[in-house]
Amino acid sequence: MRFRVLGQLEVTVDGQAVPLGSPKQRTLLAALLVDHGRLVTVDRLVDALWEDRPPATCRAQIHAHVSALRRLLAAGGQPDLVDTVADGYVLRIPPGGSLDLDSFDEHAAQARRLAGQGRHTDAIVVLRAALALWRGPALDGLTARFARQVSAGLDRRRLHAAELLAAAHLATGREAEIVPELTALCAAYPLHEGLRAQLMTALHATGRTAEALAAFREGHRLAATELGIEPGERLRTVHKAILRGLPTAPRKVPPAAQPDPPAEPPAPAGDTPVPRFQLPGDVAAFVGRADEREAALARLATAGSRPVTLLVTGPAGVGKTAFATHLAHRSRPSYPDGQLYVSLRHADATPVSVRDALGTLLRGLGVASSVLPADEPARLDLYRTLLADRRVLVLLDDAVSAAQLRPLLPPVAGSALLVTSRSAVAGLTAYRVVLAPFTGPEALELLAATVGRERVAAERAAAERIVRRCGHLPLAVQIAGARLAAGPHRRLADLADALRDQRRRLDELAVSDVAVRATLASTDQGLSAPARRAYHLLSTAMPGDDTASWAVAALLDVTPRRAELVVDELVDVHLLIPVAGPAGPRYRLHALVRLYGREQARRHREELSAATARLHGGYLDLAQRAVARTGGTFFAPVLRDDPVWTVPEPVVRRVLADPVAWFETERQALVAVTGRLAGEGLPRPAAALATSIAAFFESGNHFDEWRATHDRVLAAARRAGDRTATMAMLRDLGELHTIQDRYRRAHACYQEALTSARELGDRGYEAAALAGLGHLDRLLARYDTAVAHLARARRISRRDGNRAGVAYAEYGLGLVLMERRQWRRADRRFRECLTQSRAAKWLGGEARAARCLGQARRHQGRYAAAVPYFERARRIGVRLGDRLAESYAEQWLGDLSIRLGEPERGAAMLRRCLSVYQARGQRFGEAATLHSLAAAARALGEPGQASGYLHQALRIWERIDAPYWLAETRQALAALTDEPDPDPAG
């Protein structure tokens, strides 16, 4: 049985080929053959067959492939050639069998011995026989990395034999015979000085001196242009001999004591590879990113045990190239055979082809341009062969895609690929470093490194404004620093002021041929048309700091799925930055990225208005749906308006799974959209949006935003003469003024809203205005008027089927009865409020009813029975995110703790409530809590402290005009010394 690897893998028996099965079985056989007689571990076989991506069942598959191989060999009459040994296998060549590689090595060794003995003619015969065993490249047809590496090593041994053959011809005066072969070898390996010296010697010896000198000149040119060095000593020595007309002695035949081929490949980079350094300059002062740098350097240091690919990504201007270049400089000692650099984009931002990138890399590895293979596969084979035995770091800057990078990955351990890219390069297996803009201190450090620490220290506040207006983007900070460094007389404050104007900011962030605008333009131009439109429209129309993918669907008027694909593209190139949201990811734009996008949005003027209207319609649609899911507003109807664009139902279900969380996430955007609609003279949709979010403002205690939105919409509605929108805003503002203890303003708003509702025939708003007046009258102790208003509101709400309106009126009527100390009648009203609130799915009303049912039991001295009601009310407040509702309940729990003999615990709870009321300007709650704190102080034996609390409460009651509580607090002050604390209602 004969085995052949010097060409295509073959096994023959009596001249007949043995079928070798699948490619993996052929690769397995090759791996066992080249190490025949020695143990080949399963791990080595796994690497040979699957390289870096072995399947989970790889070891079992190896055993199966070995079994199949055994069957194939048994069919050829040799069933026992593969032995299982320890954790691997050994293939043994059978007696009488042969391997062509063994025959070649034996012939080459014999030829060296013969040449060493001066028997050059015999050596020629043996070497010719050795070289005749080659039928083509070793393991031809096998594409596995292992096979390519073995083939490259065997090719070097073949070339060494050819060099020995030429030396033997020169030693025997048979120069003319070897000239054609040497000419072909020099064409294939132009930088191999040994072969070129032999060719020059043969040409000169046969009278072709001019051609010999031409061969030297070509070698000199290649050494200078490709390697940047002069020819080696051996070539210069032959050249001098030719110039002097002296015979050139043949190269001494390598001694028999040298059994192994040269360690370094003689082609195509010459006998001694010259390390190439092509890196851009390192940054003068590396700032920040200490953790990322150390982790990346540690990964690059592992290339000796495995191939390393490290990908650096991040938004435009974040410093990817500077970071990667710094890593490459720091890692130079680990890669002594060279550090290569290739930019993978042309100046016009189009991608460099793999073929052209390979050409640049091969020239960096010493391959002359004149002998570069023309086609990509040949270049790729040569690139991988040259890297196989070297430790080279390749820096590829500004990569476009995984398809551009995969062919350039290091084939074996020893070398590393360091890549920068604006995109995430999906599909590339690599260690990833994602860079973000600097932190504030890091950006200041970079500015100081550029401008000088003294100038930054002297104008610290201005420096902070500069880096903040640069968005902490390294490129922008560097440009700002360069401008200041070029003008040492210029104050930092002047540049900070210039950067304040967003319309001029990108103009200011340019110096020489470096500009933030140009960097962003490069990324922008690489986008697909839909992604560019989305980026530009979002930059202008996005109302908040971040948004969800449905906004892109609205702007482009496409399906949610298509919008998500566009968003993915923008995220991939780091124009959109994903952030976590309660209902899925949200996306924001860096400040400078958004400024550039706004500039580009001018090209979309015709569609911008319609796109923005769709976006605003989406917000209105979601707000109306959100408030409906929470049971609507308790104090007034939601003014309805049909949105221009509606959000698809599947998106609604996901986004509004938690309406309160959605509102808190979109609050900034909702306020902005309300203001935009009002400013554009659209009071009806503005009012519809404002009334939809008013309940969320109330439960979240966002009173400043509540007032700002409603004041602006009210003004727009009055200008437009829209009485319905005006009425809605007045009713909501009346509620806000009541909550914030501005009772006179509240009364004016309610009264005007009531008049408009009656004139417009709007029964829902009539009931809402009456209920508001009733609650206000109750606070002012005008109980008869309060009952009249609330009863009228209840009747209208019942006729209209408005359960929330009924619940709100019952709540007010119950409070009047409780303040009149009619506990049982009040209890019935609160129970009805609870029933109606639950039917309306109005959690806010349920919390109010529970709290008041607790108060009714507290007033009757049933303290333990009151606790569960207050606890229920507090839990609802927490669920709604309503800190005031939570505090109202906790306030009464604190009061109960005092009455149950735990004044310290009660005082602690009351102090928490007090801080909430004071932070939100809720003076009524503040005064009521001070009243209860006085009871705690008295129980703790601190009458002076109790008196102080009561006097503070008294001043607040007088300021907001609350007669009932004024009387209660004065009574408590009078009874402080010798009477128990009165039991005020409320």
Image (spheres, grey):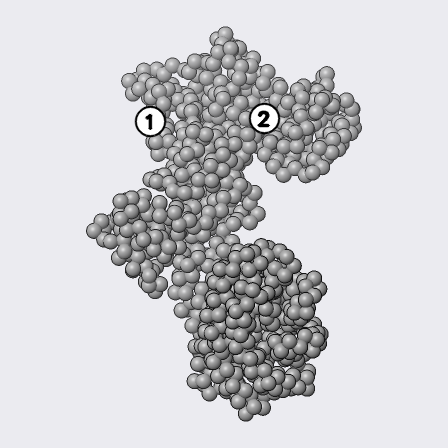
Examine the rendered structure and indicate whether residue 844 appears above or below residue 284: below
Residue 142 lies in what quarter of the image? top right
Question: On the rendered image, what quadrant is the C terminus found in?
Answer: bottom right
Check contact, mark 2 vs mark 1: CB within 8 A. no
Pair 2/1: label in front: 1
Q: Which of the two residues, 755 or 297, is positioned nearer the viewer here?
A: 755
Percent x, y of residue 400: 48, 50
The image's mark for residue 230 is 1
Residue at x 49%, y 9% (from the top left corner) = 116
Percent x, y of residue 356: 45, 44
**Amino acid, disc 1:** Glu
Outermost residue on the top side: it is 117
Is label 2 in a helix, a strand or a loop? Answer: loop
The image's mark for residue 134 is 2
Residue 964 lies in what quarter of the image? bottom right
Outermost residue on the left side: it is 489
Neighbour tally class for label 1: few under 14, some 14-19, many 20 plus, Cα within 10 Å: some
Examine the rendered structure and indicate whether residue 970 appears above or below residue 247: below
Asked if residue 653 shows in the view, the reply is no
Examine the rendered structure and indicate whether residue 850 appears above or below residue 136: below
Residue at x 55%, y 17% (from the top left corner) = 108
The image's mark for residue 213 is none
Residue at x 35%, y 25% (from the top left corner) = 231
**Gap between marks 2 and 1 measured at Cα:** 35 Å
Q: Which of the two residues, 747 or 729, is positioned nearer the viewer here?
A: 747
